[in-house]
């Protein structure tokens, strides 16, 4: 979700790539809540740090303790900033489909706010 949101906000102004700790499948709830914003992530292929096409990053943001540890390990010989944004894992949500979707929406919306703040996003035409 974070990669798609960043691309949505900044287009080609920034190079952005996402990676996880373990290879996995695309989460259908993430696809649904991103689709609500008109963002199609259905063709995204989740991958790990080892499969990143580039390792020249200025900033790496991790969302879980395990990912943060992995990011620090990945960058120990690089001049790159690494930040940890504690984020609840919405896939751990128990409850109805609507409760689960609400958890994913909360993560999506929180990520959007944090990305805007961190990367100093300004809407077109705003001062």
Image: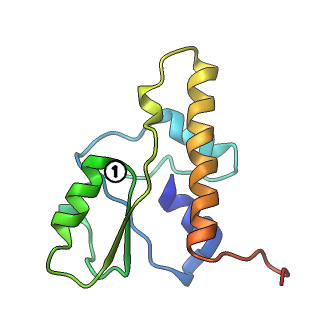
Residue 101, image x, y percentages: 60, 29
Q: Nearer the viewer, residue 10 or 88?
A: 88
Residue 120, image x, y percentages: 63, 77
Q: Residue at x 43, y 49 (%)?
A: 86
Q: Residue at x 46, y 46 (%)?
A: 87
Q: Residue furthest top?
A: 96
- Taking the image as shown, residue 62 lies to the left or right of residue 41, namely left
Q: Nearer the viewer, residue 31 or 100?
A: 100
Q: Secondary structure at mark 1?
A: loop
Q: Nearer the viewer, residue 82 or 74?
A: 82
Q: Residue at x 29, y 48 (%)?
A: 65
Instruction: Tell me: residue 71, above or below residue 90.
Output: below
Instruction: Tell me: residue 81, above or below residue 95.
Output: below
Instruction: Tell me if mark 1 has few (under 14), some (14-19) or many (20+) residues whose alpha carbon lies within 10 angstroms of its own.
Output: some
Determine if residue 121 is in view. Answer: yes
- Taking the image as shown, residue 63 lies to the left or right of residue 20, namely right
Coloring scheme of the render? rainbow
Residue 22, image x, y percentages: 22, 46
Residue holding disc 1: 46
Query: Could you tell me which quadrant the C terminus lies in?
Result: bottom right
- Taking the image as shown, residue 77 lies to the left or right of residue 6, namely left
Instruction: Tell me: residue 15, above or below residue 85.
Output: below
Determine if residue 51 is in view. Answer: no
Residue 78, image x, y percentages: 20, 82
Q: Residue at x 28, y 56 (%)?
A: 68
């Amino acid at each position: 979700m974070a990669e798609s949101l960043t691309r949505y906000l900044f287009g080609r102004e920034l190079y952005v790539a996402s990676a996880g700790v373990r290879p996995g499948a695309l989460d259908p709830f993430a696809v649904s809540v991103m689709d609500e914003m008109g963002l199609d992530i259905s063709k995204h292929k989740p991958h790990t740090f080892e499969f990143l096409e580039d390792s020249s990053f200025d900033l790496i943001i991790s969302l879980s303790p395990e990912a943060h540890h992995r990011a620090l390990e990945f960058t120990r010989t690089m001049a790159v900033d690494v930040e940890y944004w504690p984020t609840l894992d919405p896939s751990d949500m128990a409850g109805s489909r609507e409760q689960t979707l609400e958890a994913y929406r909360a993560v999506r919306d929180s990520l959007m706010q944090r990305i805007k703040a961190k990367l100093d996003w300004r809407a077109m035409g705003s001062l």
